[in-house]
Image: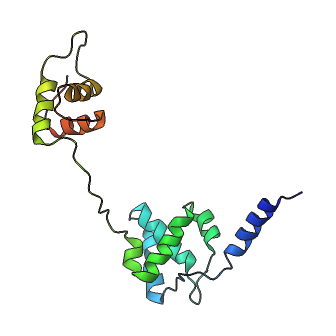
């Protein structure tokens, strides 16, 4: 016996492809040719190729396959949100924006400023703690906090900082 939840889920997925889409992809002949050429070359980033394939499969213009989102997801192995996002970007901004997502505008806060980096290098060049043959990244991070140079720092930030220098830890 099929539960209500399971039958609802099956019905929703069965009608999803038929539902009227808010963002309908209709490619011109030139756009379709450009995307097919891009996909056939295969010499660009994988993300760009996937986005081009999404647009080609979602094309609802005359002669386009007009595949529903669940089938595009299954065919390309990408997420449903990706398909929806590419559709939306194509309709709102255009082909170029849909193929090349905008770079992130996130600003990362630096844990170690110039002064703290200098202290880190000085500690790393110094003698390791007693009972240790050399400094580990975690020991360096703990030492920076213990000496009060920073409030908190992870070993990865220590690694990235030391990588920028020509310092050899042994």
**Vertical arrangement, residue 23 with respect to residue 166, above or below:** below
Of residue 99 and residue 18, the one placed in the foreground of this image is 18
Residue 145: quadrant of the picture: top left
Q: How is the image coloured?
A: rainbow
Of residue 98 and residue 56, the one placed in the foreground of this image is 98
**Vertical arrangement, residue 132 with respect to residue 119, above or below:** above
Q: Residue at x 57, y 60 (%)?
A: 77
Q: Residue at x 53, y 66 (%)?
A: 81
Residue 69 location in percent, x, y? 61, 71
Relative to 113, 86 lies left or right: right
Most distant residue in the top direction:
131
Q: Is residue 87 visible?
A: yes
Residue 28 location in percent, x, y? 47, 89
Q: Is residue 42 visible?
A: no
Q: Residue at x 52, y 82 (%)?
A: 25
Count numbered badges in the picture: 0
Q: Residue at x 59, y 65 (%)?
A: 73
Of residue 108 and residue 151, the one placed in the foreground of this image is 151
Relative to 30, 16 lies left or right: right
Most distant residue in the right direction:
1
Relative to 61, 127 lies left or right: left
Split into 4 quadrants, where in the image is the C terminus?
top left
Relative to 169, 95 lies left or right: right
Residue 114 location in percent, x, y? 11, 41
Of residue 135 and residue 43, the one placed in the foreground of this image is 135
**Vertical arrangement, residue 147 with respect to residue 5, above or below:** above
Split into 4 quadrants, where in the image is the N terminus?
bottom right
């Amino acid at each position: 016996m099929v539960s209500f939840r399971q039958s609802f889920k099956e019905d929703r997925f069965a009608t999803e492809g038929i539902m009227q889409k808010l963002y309908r992809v209709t490619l011109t002949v030139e756009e379709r040719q450009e995307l097919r050429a891009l996909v056939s070359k295969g010499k660009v980033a994988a993300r760009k190729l996937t986005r081009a394939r999404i647009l080609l499969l979602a094309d609802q213009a005359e002669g386009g396959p007009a595949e529903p989102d669940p089938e595009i997801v299954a065919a390309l192995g990408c997420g449903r949100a990706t398909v929806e996002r590419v559709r939306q970007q194509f309709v709102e901004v255009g082909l170029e924006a849909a193929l090349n997502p905008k770079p992130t505008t996130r600003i990362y806060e630096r844990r170690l400023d110039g002064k703290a980096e200098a202290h880190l290098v000085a500690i790393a060049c110094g003698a390791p703690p007693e009972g240790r043959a050399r400094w580990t990244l975690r020991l360096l991070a703990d030492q920076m906090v213990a000496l009060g140079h920073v409030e908190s720092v992870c070993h990865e930030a220590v690694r990235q900082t030391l990588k920028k220098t020509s310092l050899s830890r042994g």
